[in-house]
Image (cartoon, helix red, strand yellow):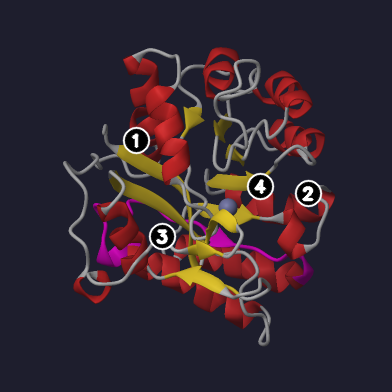
């Protein structure tokens, strides 16, 4: 298989799922070692502990920063998480995580964090724009118009719109909204119908700029190897497959880590995971990782 760079993986624990699920840095590397992934961009897991509010968010962001320090070749950049209900202290934590810990921006999940992807995010985006950073939005098919408005308003921020085109109508809307924007990339994580000619991988590669479509795993929630297989068999050129699998992500990462190049080959399996099955799924849900 060709090399893969995973633009969208979550580090830490999501506690508002049953059962609780999460990944450590070494678990991401262990999965990478078995799936052709040579590098990844971790973001703090949404739905993490919040008993201490923004202090918990700081701990989650610190985990990502530590992973990037410990494995700079595998995790060349990382993103924190924000909770809009933290208001100003949340904006300060975001700024701190970028200024002191070297994170390049944030990831947000409106469904888990309970917000609308609109003006409540402006102070957070302001902080990222002044630092010329990167933001990942879980867009799906519900938040296309709101996300487009954010990307147009904050043109100095680069955005990755996650889970783009998760149904046929959403594909058309997402193309209209995002394809013209210079500061927008998209990922195909958890695409439910990757072989569909009108809105699957081939259509996404055809309808978005060729250098803007990227593979994302959305681990620890999803057995992303099914999307890798779909990319490998998609009716697109080998060159287009390379762009989706790793080249576009490498170019985007290098905007923030100019000296970085993708490592050759997967990481070794960290010893703590060497005899653990990493792909067990939930009963009755064959793609949902435990
Ligand atoms: Zn995700």
User: Which numbered disc covers residue 241?
Assistant: none
Q: Give the secondary structure at mark 1.
A: helix
User: Which numbered disc covers residue 250?
Assistant: 1
Residue 199: x and y in percent read 65, 21
- Residue assigned mark 4: 138
User: Which numbered disc covers residue 117?
Assistant: 2
Q: Give the secondary structure at mark 3.
A: loop
Q: Magenta segment, which residues?
A: 68-85
Magenta stretch: residue 116 in it?
A: no
Q: Residue at x 41, y 60 (%)?
A: 279
Q: Is 289 rendered above or below residue 185?
A: below
- Residue assigned mark 3: 279
In front: label 4 or label 3: 3
Magenta stretch: residue 77 in it?
A: yes
Q: What is the CA distance from the residue labelled 3 to the residue labelled 2? A: 32 Å
In front: label 2 or label 4: 4
In front: label 4 or label 1: 4
Q: Residue at x 81, y 58 (%)?
A: 115
Which of the 4 quarters of the picture holds residue 112?
A: bottom right
Confirm whether residue 74 shows in the render.
no
């Amino acid at each position: 298989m060709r090399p893969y760079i995973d633009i969208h993986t979550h580090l830490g624990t999501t506690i508002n799922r049953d059962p609780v699920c999460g990944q450590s840095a070494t678990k991401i590397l262990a999965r990478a070692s078995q799936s052709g992934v040579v590098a990844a961009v971790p973001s703090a897991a949404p739905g993490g502990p919040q008993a201490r509010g923004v202090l918990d968010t700081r701990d989650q962001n610190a985990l990502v920063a530590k992973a990037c320090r410990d494995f700079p070749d595998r995790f060349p950049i990382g993103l924190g998480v924000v909770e809009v209900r933290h208001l100003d202290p949340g904006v300060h934590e975001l700024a701190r995580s970028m200024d002191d810990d070297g994170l390049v921006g944030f990831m947000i999940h409106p469904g888990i964090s309970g917000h609308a992807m609109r003006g409540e995010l402006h102070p957070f985006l302001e902080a990222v724009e002044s630092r010329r950073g990167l933001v990942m939005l879980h867009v799906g098919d519900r938040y296309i118009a709101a996300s487009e408005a954010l990307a147009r308003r904050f043109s100095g921020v680069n955005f990755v719109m996650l889970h783009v085109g998760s149904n046929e109508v959403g594909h058309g809307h997402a193309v209209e909204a995002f394809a013209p924007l210079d500061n927008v990339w998209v990922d195909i994580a958890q695409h439910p119908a990757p072989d569909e000619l009108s809105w699957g991988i081939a259509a996404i590669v055809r309808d978005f700029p060729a250098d803007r479509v990227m593979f994302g795993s959305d681990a620890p929630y999803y057995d992303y190897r099914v999307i890798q297989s779909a990319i490998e068999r998609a009716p697109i050129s080998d060159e287009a497959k390379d762009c989706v699998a790793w080249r576009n992500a490498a170019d985007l990462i290098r905007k923030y880590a100019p000296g970085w190049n993708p490592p050759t080959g997967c990481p070794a399996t960290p010893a703590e995971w060497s005899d653990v099955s990493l792909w067990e799924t939930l009963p009755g849900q064959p793609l949902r990782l435990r």
